[in-house]
Every structure is written in structure tokens, then in C-alpha cells.
Amino acid sequence: MKLIKDILNRYKGVLPASLSIGIFMLIPILIIVVYSFMIPNPNGGVRTGFSLASYQKLFYDYDLFDNLVFNAGYLKIIFRSLWISIISVVASLLVGFPVAYYIAMQNTERRNLLILLITIPFWTNLLIRTYSWILVLRDTGLINSTLMSLGIIDEPITLLYTEGAIVLGLVYTYVPFMILPIYASLERLDIRLIEACRDLYSTKWDALRYVVFPLAKPGIIAGSILVFIPSIGAFIAPELLGGGKNLMLGSLVQLQFSSGRNWPFGSALAVVIMSVVLIALLIQAYNARKNGSEIVH
């Protein structure tokens, strides 16, 4: 009893946060994992019993003769989700790094104004912002109407309901998550280091490569993970801008819990997403630990 009291006294400061994490995060995750090993109820929900059928369904399915055959359909959706998420990370980095570098080079007052402008899109509902891109990308939208009025094209270009539209929506949504960590790494950059590099007859690219990029590396890795994690499970952008024709994991999970009524399979897909996210977080933790040890040495 005394041991329990000592433990409570020692950790009472973090007890409320621990309870909140346990109730609102760990317990739901545990329920999803348990559901993934149960039997689906045809009317929705689950039935008691242990089964690996949901994980087997990721790779195999039954044909007309009830034979188990390899099915690459769901694997294609998983790899498509990974591919689109990686492209979104690269595109966000190409857009976010110059912006973060430019902000870091400004004076304090101008920095604060630019950071405010970066965060303004978060003041608007994500659904409204995504619908706005439909008005821009559709056949009668702003881009096609402008190009046709200028005589550049004779008929509309298919921009909406493509993988490119999904990537555009993801980059637009999550690029601030790339800009802010990189800016946090570069705001402490001593401009005299770049000036010294240029005084030694280095080109602008050499200054970026040997001075700026190494200092921005922690922010680049953190920003990449912050963009990748929500992109892999995104639902709104693939559903609205992809038109449901380019399924990603988030849309597939939603279909299994709604029209598919296969809760165990939907839970198994959610476990796959959480596994990918966990791997990304472990990479971030390893990078942070490595950078910390390098600073100490």
C-alpha cells in the first residue's frame, strides 16, 4: 500500500494527462485491434470469436469456386496511398523550404506577420477549403475557363478527380506543417555563416548545401513526418478531389464501416495505417535522438 502511495505521489503531476491518454486514445486503439481479430456481423458490428480473416483479406480472397486466391486489389490501394503521401511530402518540401527560408531571413516584426499569414487557412473549415478547389479544378472552373478564354486550349483539361488533384489538396492542406518546423530550425541561423561562406568564394548552392541544409535537417525530417502521417489516412481530399475513383486507405476504411459493414476488415486497415504511422514516429524519434547525441558530442 505504501509503495502504491509513493508511486501516486511521484507521478500525480502527470496522472490527469495519463488518464486522458488512456481513456481517449489507448482504449479506442485497443478496441480497434481487438475488432480486427473478430468475425464480421452481416448487419454491421462484430461477433465474438477469433479470426485472422480480416488480415488474410488484405492479400487473398475467395473465387467463385470458394478457392483462396491472391488478390492484389487492396495492396494496390495501400501502395497508392503510400505513393501519393510520399509525393505530397516531396511537393510540400519543395514549396515549404523556400518559404521557411525566406521567413527566417526577415526581421522579427515581418516574421510574425508572415507566420500569421501561413496560419490563416487554419481559421477556415477544411471541408470548405477543399470544396473551393473543386470550383478551381473542374472543367468549367477557373483554370480551364482562363486557358480557354486565352485560346491556349480548345477543350477543358481533366484536372479534377485525378491523383494530381489529390496531391494538390493534400499539399495545400498540410504544407504549413512543413513550413513551421523548418522555420523553427532556421530562425536561429546566424546570417554571418552564410556571409562567411560567400566570402570564401562559395556559390549560393554551396552555401545552401553546406550551411543551410544541415541546420534545417531536423525541421525537414519533422515536417516530412508531420505531412506524411495525416496524408496516409486522409479522407476529405481523396473523396472530394479524387471523386472516389482513386481510393486511398482513409476512404477504404470509411467504406468498410458504412456500406461494406465489415468492421473487422475496416479495423484491420486502421491497424495497418497505425503501423505505418508508428514506423514514421519511430524514425522521427531515432532522428531526434541522433541529433541530440551529435550536439552533445
Image (tube, grey):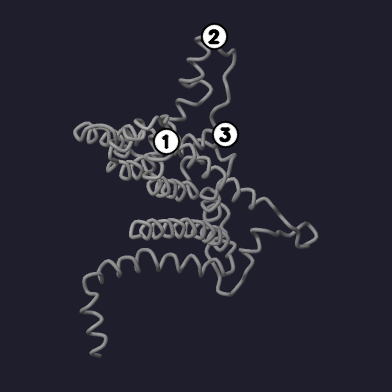
Secondary structure at badge 2 equals: loop
Alpha-carbon neighbours of circle 2 within 10 Å: few (<14), some, or many (≥20)? few
Secondary structure at badge 1 equals: helix
Picture quadrant where residue 164 is located: top right
> Counting residues from the N terminus, which is met first, the one under dot 3 or under dot 1?
3
Q: Which residue is mark 2?
A: 151
Alpha-carbon neighbours of circle 1 within 10 Å: few (<14), some, or many (≥20)? some
> Counting residues from the N terminus, which is met first, the one under dot 1 or under dot 2?
2
**In the displayed structure image, the side of residue 88 where residue 74 appears, left or right:** right
Residue placed furthest toward the right: 65
Q: Which residue is mark 1?
A: 172
**In the displayed structure image, the side of residue 277 where residue 71 appears, left or right:** right
Q: Label 1 to label 2, Cα distance in Å?
A: 28 Å
Residue placed furthest toward the front: 200
> Counting residues from the N terminus, which is met first, the one under dot 3 or under dot 2?
2
Mark 1 is on which residue type? Tyr
Is 117 drawn above or below residue 144 in the view shown?
below
Alpha-carbon neighbours of circle 3 within 10 Å: few (<14), some, or many (≥20)? some
Judge by depth and name the residue closer to the eye, 130 or 174: 174
Residue placed furthest toward the bottom: 1
Q: Which residue is mark 3?
A: 162
Mark 2 is on which residue type? Gly
